[in-house]
């Protein structure tokens, strides 16, 4: 994989999107991937179609895209791509007041308005105020980032999943920390879209694949399993409901970080995950929000 390039601060990005039938998803993604920094898919506005969206920092080669689609759909029924420029202006304006740079453990989180160097040794995460949750200021996100930084001292995951990705902050953090491929999934299609865009702006679009589904329902999430590391920052009740799916998608010997829990709700989440054979190894509380680390024994079945 390529080394990360400088973040795409305050510049235009290109978007290519197409609506496709679910069975054509993989074909279309394969056409977009060579031309884009990130590719995501989510449920389109109406019907059963899926919208596939690629984000690119450079103008996509239209002739190459057309040729790839025509080869993939030899019967002449290739979906028609729509190509747009996405302007950077709102990111800058919205951020000046409400998002001062923030250091959390190994990470330095800043908006587009910040153009200084990150502190020595820090991994910078470029994120602007927007339509999806996850700027790093919330205690649950900060707890996850702190625990990810800790995990990096003793683990080198080769595959990771960010369940409930919001802005994609944790997916981007994992992609930068370990240079691994990360699947990012959210119940909200807008979050998947924002994650793909933020991953591209952080020069890790090639490592982060964003998708939309309730819990572990996305074919992409299932296809890429098992994961060495799973992060779920959602809320106590959905996290408890997802405990069996999480344990199933986690590789033997893998770890997970769970957050979005008020300290008083941590007990039910701990019990649910112990029932799935996971072992609680660490917890932190920030501003009343508890974040937990569990491990799956290396000898456990999937
Ligand atoms: C607290 S935000 C976390 C965002 C980001 N990961 C962070 O750490 O800042 C929770 C996210 O989980 C998503 N979510 C809620 N229920 C979900 C479910 N059942 N499956 C997948 N995502 C869900 C929400 O749409 C939201 O984006």
Image (cartoon, rainbow, N blue to C red):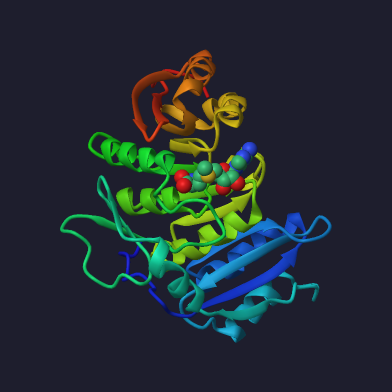
Decide if residue 235 is in sight here.
yes
In the image, what residue occupies the spot 80% across and 73% down?
A: 77
| Left or right placement of residue 151 versus residue 239 in this view | left
Q: Nearer the viewer, residue 73 or 126?
A: 126
Percent coordinates x, y for residue 21 in the rendering: 77, 59
In the image, what residue occupies the spot 63% across and 80% down?
A: 83
Q: Nearer the viewer, residue 217 or 263?
A: 263
Residue 163 higher or lower than 288, as above or below: below
Q: Nearer the viewer, residue 227 or 191?
A: 191
Percent coordinates x, y for residue 157 in the rendering: 35, 40
In the image, what residue occupies the spot 56% across and 30% down?
A: 239
Decide if residue 216 is in sight here.
no
Q: Looking at this rendering, what residue extends furthest in the bottom direction?
A: 63
In the image, what residue occupies the spot 53% across and 70% down?
A: 55
Residue 294 higher or lower than 163, as above or below: above
Residue 139 higher or lower than 209, as above or below: above
Percent coordinates x, y for residue 86 in the rendering: 55, 78
Percent coordinates x, y for residue 68 in the rendering: 63, 75
Q: Looking at this rendering, what residue extends furthest in the left direction?
A: 120
Q: Nearer the viewer, residue 240 or 179?
A: 240
In the rendered view of the protein, which quadrant contains the N terminus? bottom left
| Left or right placement of residue 293 versus residue 59 in this view | left
Q: Looking at this rendering, what residue extends furthest in the front direction?
A: 97
Q: How many marks?
A: 0
Residue 293 falls in which quadrant of the image?
top left
Quadrant assignment for ligand 1? top right
Residue 67 higher or lower than 134, as above or below: below
| Left or right placement of residue 153 versus residue 78 in this view | left
């Amino acid at each position: 994989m390529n080394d990360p390039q400088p973040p795409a601060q305050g510049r235009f990005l290109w978007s290519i999107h197409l609506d496709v039938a679910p069975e054509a998803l993989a074909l279309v993604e394969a056409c977009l991937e060579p031309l884009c920094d990130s590719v995501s898919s989510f449920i389109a506005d109406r019907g059963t179609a899926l919208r596939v969206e690629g984000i690119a920092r450079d103008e996509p080669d239209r002739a190459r895209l057309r040729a790839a689609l025509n080869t993939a759909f030899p019967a002449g029924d290739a979906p028609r791509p729509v190509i747009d420029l996405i302007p950077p202006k709102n990111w800058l304006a919205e951020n000046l007041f409400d998002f001062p740079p923030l250091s959390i453990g190994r990470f330095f989180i800043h908006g587009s308005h910040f153009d200084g160097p990150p502190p020595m040794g820090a991994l910078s995460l470029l994120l602007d105020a927007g339509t999806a949750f996850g700027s790093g200021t919330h205690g649950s996100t900060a707890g996850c980032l702190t625990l990810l930084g800790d995990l990096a001292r003793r683990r080198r995951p080769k595959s990771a999943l960010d369940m409930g990705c919001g802005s994609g902050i944790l997916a981007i953090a994992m992609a930068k920390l370990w240079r691994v491929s990360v699947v990012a999934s959210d119940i909200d299609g807008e979050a998947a879209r924002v994650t793909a865009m933020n991953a591209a702006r952080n020069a890790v679009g090639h490592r982060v694949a964003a998708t939309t589904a309730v819990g572990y329902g996305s074919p992409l999430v299932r296809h890429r399993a098992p994961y060495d590391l799973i992060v779920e920052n959602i809320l106590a009740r959905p996290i408890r409901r997802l405990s069996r799916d999480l344990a199933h998608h986690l590789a033997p010997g893998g770890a997970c970080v769970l957050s979005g829990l008020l300290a008083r709700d941590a007990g039910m989440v701990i019990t649910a995950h112990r029932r799935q054979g996971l072992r609680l190894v660490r917890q932190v509380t920030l501003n009343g929000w508890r974040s937990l680390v569990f491990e799956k024994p290396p000898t456990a079945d999937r």
